[in-house]
Amino acid sequence: MVSVAGVEDTLASEDADLVAQIAAGNVGQPVAELYRRFGTRLYRFGYQQLGDAGLAEEMVQECFVRLWRTAGRFDLSRGSVAAYMFVMAKSIAADLRRRPSSRPLALVEEEMVPPQPDSTDQIADTLMVQDALESLSPAHREVLMLVHAEGLTQSQIAERLGLPLGTVKTRMFHGLRALKAALAERGYDG
Amino acid sequence: MADMDALAEAGHADAAGWVLGILDPDDHQRFEAHLTACQTCQQAVAEFGSAATMLKAALPVMESLPKIEPPADLRARTVARVELAARKASWRRWSPRRTISAAAVAVAAAVAAIIVSLAGSAAPALAFSIPLHATSYGGGAAGSAVAHHTANGWSIQLNVSHLKPLPAGSFYECWYAGSGNRPGHHDLITAGTFTVGANGSATVQMWSAADPRSFPVMQITAEQPGDAGQHGQVILTGLAQT
């Protein structure tokens, strides 16, 4: 069995290899692959930060252009590619927010602006967990999503799902293991 | 780490519930007593800890986040934009004149076209195809364009379909955009305006002095009368390809 730590190292290294390919002038395929890995999360982050789909698209595209411009300076020993991209995304979102000319022509209705969690780091982490959960099997995702709901215990979760307690325990165990691997795939180095 | 499948089936699965803080009181007490003597479970708890912390912190915030997916074509557009920036950088490295404004490029292209025309020389056989795809504002719109270099500038044949009919006086506008174009910093040259019929389609012939090699992105916007410049959202966009 491959340990989670091993998967994490391999994927972080793969991400860094893709950035190195971009730095070497091979742009298309590595950018497409990095978009596959990070694009949805970056877009959701942009939408959450900017409250507009068009600006979120602009943020994502600019993020990859900046990655290309700075790829030669990327250093894996200082942090993962995921962390690097979200640092850029935060900066670009802040720039876009400051530009009056970049506001959408149709004003965003107040009630359409999503609630603003406390920090951009928290949002970035949450989006990574959400993305990782979406990659799990429905059975694993189902039990993990109930972990925080109303402070349920395992036996209450079992009751709610109509499953034997032993099944919930096993799914919780394997689900958490799968989540750990999925987070590692997405650049989480915890 | 030891084989997790065997662990789970051997009754150590409460390691996950313990790090998540969801064990029932009896199980909690039993597992903590077990944990002090079980190195395998200690290892499992250490292994799961960070994922459990991330999950518990994320779940309450997740409920407040918008459930939204990026447009299907954003990946292709992002790759195209980075490739365009890389190509532009390559051209700049090749060219001794590094900073050319949009207006200067247009003027230079126009002057070059006139000189070529006056000299009676044959223009180079140069053409670009520009497949257009709808942005998130474009609905089911589609289109394509072909730009041919001639002695008098660039001849552009544009075909569009499924564009929404606009209110009287409004019109669609075709733009060439440079790679530096972005919100608040326009690097754009208009290529012409047009309207569509009731079926949302149009075949349009336009002329421009702007070179697609310097302005490789075509954009179509809907504009209001009396407003110079690009004010409408980009509805169709595409990259010039040889």
Image: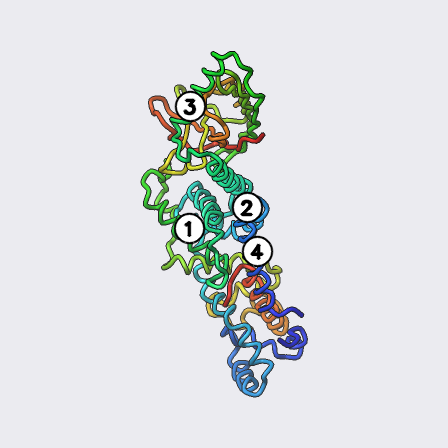
Q: What colour scheme was applied to this rendering of the protein?
A: rainbow
Q: Closer to the N terminus: mark 1 or mark 4?
A: 4
Q: Looking at the rendered structure, which numbered label has been put on residue B5?
A: none
The residue at which mark 4 appears reads as A17
* Amino acid bearing label 2: Gly
Q: Mark 4, chain letter? A: A
B85 in relation to B42, above or below: above
Q: Are marks 1 and 4 in contact (CB under 8 Å)?
A: no
**Alpha carbon of mark 2 to alpha carbon of mark 1: how far?**
32 Å
Q: Closer to the N terminus: mark 2 or mark 1?
A: 2
Image check: A40 left or right of B181? right
The residue at which mark 1 appears reads as A48
* Amino acid bearing label 4: Asp
Nearest the viewer among A110 and B234 is: B234
B227 in relation to B99, above or below: above
**Regarding mark 4 in the picture, which secondary structure is present there?**
helix
Residues at marks 2 and 3, common chain? Answer: no
Residue B67 at x, y percent in the picture:
49, 50
Nearest the viewer among A108 and A18 is: A18
The residue at which mark 2 appears reads as A25
The residue at which mark 3 appears reads as B108
Name the image quarter holding the C terminus of chain B. Answer: top right
**Alpha carbon of mark 1 to alpha carbon of mark 4: how far?**
30 Å
* Amino acid bearing label 1: Gln
Q: Residues within 10 Å of mark 2 (few under 14, many from 20)?
A: some
* Amino acid bearing label 3: Ala
Residue B237 at x, y percent in the picture:
50, 32
